[in-house]
Amino acid sequence: IHTGRLAANKRLDLLIRTLPQLQRKWPNIKLALIGEGPEREELSRLASKLSISKAVHFLGPITDHKLLAPWVLASDLFVAPAQIGLMAPMCLAYKRTLVISDVVKHHGPEVQAFIPGKTGLSYKFGDVQDLTEKISTLLADPEKRKQFAETGSAHVRDIMGPEQMLDAFLAAIHYVTGRHKKKYPDNPVYPV
């Protein structure tokens, strides 16, 4: 699964290009793309050109989490070939393993939820073969996916739980007002 804007900076073409190889081992594999954007038609044409249109599902935007959750929970992996933001902690909170680009500058600050080799795998950006291998490795190992998912869910709770968010919010207020003289404990995630 991938959810987000279907835009050039997401490089979803790389993900679509993995499917012909992945179908050799998993003939029934499906890719759910949730979102809308300017690349929709181009991605659809690419799927047709690669003869994998039946495996790629363009679901449009789903912003209601009650409707989005079943799709995320039904997936084996969340793959972000280029940029990832809020979907990193969300998918980890849903206990889904991530495959993301190794280029940190592509990602939003939420990428701190991802720990390579512990909550998912990173692949060499732009390398379709490496992306295919990372996806294949995780699809072939449900136990590894489960381990990564459990670690990721716990990690998100530890760094982005309600207490941490409140601490960061209070630290920001105190910093802006000039009242940051240790009245509240330092937040290890968002130090002031």
Image (cartoon, rainbow, N blue to C red):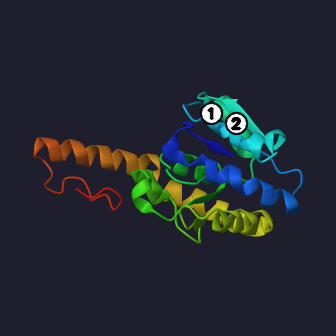
Q: In the shown orientation, is residue 141 left or right of residue 112?
A: right
Q: Give the amino acid type for the residue marked by disc 1 in the picture.
A: Arg
- Image quarter (top left, top right, bottom left or bottom right) of the C terminus: bottom left
Q: Which quarter of the picture shows residue 70? A: top right
Q: Residues within 10 Å of mark 1 (few under 14, many from 20)?
A: some
Residue 95 seen in render:
no
Q: In the shown orientation, is residue 100 left or right of residue 16?
A: left
Q: Which residue is mark 2?
A: 44
Looking at the image, the residue that sits furthest to the right is 27
Question: Of residues 90 and 169, which is closer to you in this image?
Answer: 90
Answer above or below: position of 135 versus 83. below
Badge number at residue 20: none
Answer above or below: position of 183 versus 7. below
Q: Residue at x 72, y 39 (%)?
A: 71
Q: Residues within 10 Å of mark 2 (few under 14, many from 20)?
A: some
Question: Of residues 118 and 13, which is closer to you in this image?
Answer: 13
> How many dots with numbers?
2
* x and y, in percent, of residue 20 in the image: 79, 55
* x and y, in percent, of residue 33 in the image: 67, 39
Q: Which residue is mark 1?
A: 40
Looking at the image, the residue that sits furthest to the left is 178
Where disc 2 sits, the SS reads: helix
Where disc 1 sits, the SS reads: helix
Query: Disc 1 and disc 2: Cα gap in Å?
Result: 6 Å
Q: Residue at x 49, y 58 (%)?
A: 113
Tag 1–tag 2 contact (CB < 8 Å): yes
* x and y, in percent, of residue 43 in the image: 65, 39
Q: Residue at x 61, y 47 (%)?
A: 12
Q: Residue at x 62, y 48 (%)?
A: 13
Question: Of residues 189 and 29, which is closer to you in this image?
Answer: 29
Q: Give the amino acid type for the residue marked by disc 2 in the picture.
A: Ser
